[in-house]
Image (tube, rainbow, N blue to C red):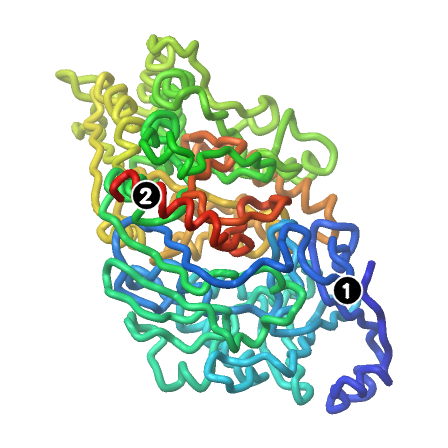
Amino acid sequence: MRSATRAFAAAIALGLAILPAAAQQAQHTTIYYGVTLIGNGLGDVKYPKDFKHWDYVNPNAPKGGDFRQYAIGSFDSFNSFIVKGLKAGGIGMLTESLFAGNGDEEDAEYGLIAENMEVPDDLSWVIFNLRPQARWSDGTPITVDDVIFSLETLKTKVHPFYKQYFANLSKAEQVGPRAVKITFDTGGELNRELPVISAQMPVISKAYWTSHDITATTLTPFLGSGPYKVKSFKAPSTITYERDPNYWGKDLPQAQGLNNFDTLTIDYYLDETVALEAFKAGEYDFRMESTSKVWAVDYASPALQKGLIVKTLIPDDTKKPMQGFVFNLRKPKFQDRKVREAMQYFFDFEWSNNTLFYGQYTRTRSFFEKSELAATGLPTGKELEILTPYKSKLPPEVFTTEYSPPKSDGTGNNRPMLQKAQQLLQDAGYTVVGGKLVKGGEQLKIEFLNSNPAFERVVGPVVQNMQRLGIDATLRTVDTSQFKERTDNFDYDVIVDVLAQSLSPGNEQRDFWGCDSAKDPGGRNSAGICDPVVEDLIQKIIAAPDRATLIATTHALDRVLQWGFYVVPNWYIAAFRVAYWDKFGRPDVNPKMGPSIAAWWVDPAKVRTVSAGKAQLGR
């Protein structure tokens, strides 16, 4: 552990003498400049206290130039803290947290607004010591009052995610000139995650937000503390940020070699097809491609042939999110597990991968894919011990069968899969009457709600397979604003959702699977799961006393979710598909977490080459 311990006298030196002396003497504490939940201890982070910069940056990268990227849809608000509104892309750059992560480590945080944190051995509270140089972009200091105001506001007035995530942070109070103490309410249970959760808290300006309504959408950029500010915008189509030359944190080690562009512009397009053509025409600089067909065939252009555009795969060995077709259990038809199981057989992944995806994908099977948290084999040891008390409430397969999505021969002859689906639906009480699959005289109707036209070719065959069995299945593609409105209010049967997980799961599991989140508009529990076993497992994850217990409990949760058939798992690719106009310099080292555009810079010589090439092409 790289952090140092200290006793009573050192506490006074840091301005904490206003705490009762008896309380200070009774507790042994540790100071951390960086924290993680994955290593052998809370302070077992990669970088030493005196590190100069991240390994994946060029600390001498030149500043200047512009960077243009794209987004789909539109925006009508700069308020990034609420459910309402279409948030402007990049607006999160204005907000900073007490500690912040990096591109090399999953679930590690280093002091940013706070230079360190102090934690007692019983993990009952945390004290953050704020950096004296921390400033808002107007030059006023970031204060303890701002931190206290941030916690109170985030827990009570804004997006329900914050209420769930910070639920155990009971209060914040000033304990020194620049020291704030956050006390935890855990019901007497140890919670290793809470110091890290506290460190991740966004800090917002009390002075600004007491005179502005944080519950309302707005096109007035709010006061932030980040390295960029809003320079100009034209809602709903474009927004430009400018690097703040007076950014308070520019001399910190974690800022070296980053934030190199003078301006960052985001242009909005109505759909991906138009956006790609704009990219090939040189209207913006960078894309991370998500569609296999587009990557395989649609980038062909004179600019690519001349080498003006770089198209490359960057290896990705990180954990993978569960992307899948998610059923809305708020609809009675999906309460029956047999119906949800039947739905698994309508998606022929092997045929889709061969025919539609150019063989680029691997099937996802776990909610914690490509990590030690993924449940495999059969439950044994600690995981079996955790699951056994729930045996009467769980499907028998949880204990007897390793989960794996249905698999076809890839030829497109999916008759065996459809026969299995038909049998399961019959077991659920459905029969075919006049070519329609009915129960209680009512035909089974299922609508896939979609906002990405590229998914139509994927969902289309699934819908056709359902229709073959007499289901009134449809696909409806809507624009991004309508999609957000409907999903925020859980107005759908099935959607494609991406459920990205942490390597150290904890409080956020409430937002993914908890009963309260199933009711809160804008919550991430898109499936609407509200199950007593899942609720118990979430609490056990949160209260896990050590890494081994956390892993075993997460295996148990993963297995229960797998056999609940709440989603039809989709796929992942073990690489980042990146295309960009060749005007940039890049560090020699790629961060583990994927391309860090903030570490790139504009290369004037390359800009001249690209400009000359565009002129030759008539761009």
Vertical side of 549 occupied by 236: above or below: below
Question: What residue does disc 1 label?
Answer: 49
The quadrant where residue 423 appears: top left
Q: Is residue 332 visible?
A: no
The quadrant where residue 478 appears: top left
Give x and y (percent) for residue 80.
39, 65
Q: Looking at the image, which residue is at 72% across and 62% down? A: 52
Q: Looking at the image, which residue is at 61% across and 67% down? A: 198
Q: Looking at the image, which residue is at 23% across and 60% down? A: 236
Give x and y (percent) for residue 274.
24, 41
Vertical side of 313 occupied by 118: above or below: below
Quarter of the picture holding the C terminus: top left
Mark closest to the chain's N terminus, 2 or 1: 1
- In the foreground, 56 or 74: 56
**Three-letter amino acid code at the position of disc 1:** Lys
Q: Looking at the image, which residue is at 67% across and 82% down? A: 179
* Other residues around mark 1 within 10 Å, as few (<14) / some (14–19) / many (≥20): few
Give x and y (percent) for residue 61.
58, 58
- In the foreground, 214 or 234: 234
- In the foreground, 511 or 455: 455
The secondary structure type at the circle numbered 1 is loop
Question: What residue does disc 2 label?
Answer: 614
**Three-letter amino acid code at the position of disc 2:** Lys
* Other residues around mark 2 within 10 Å, as few (<14) / some (14–19) / many (≥20): some
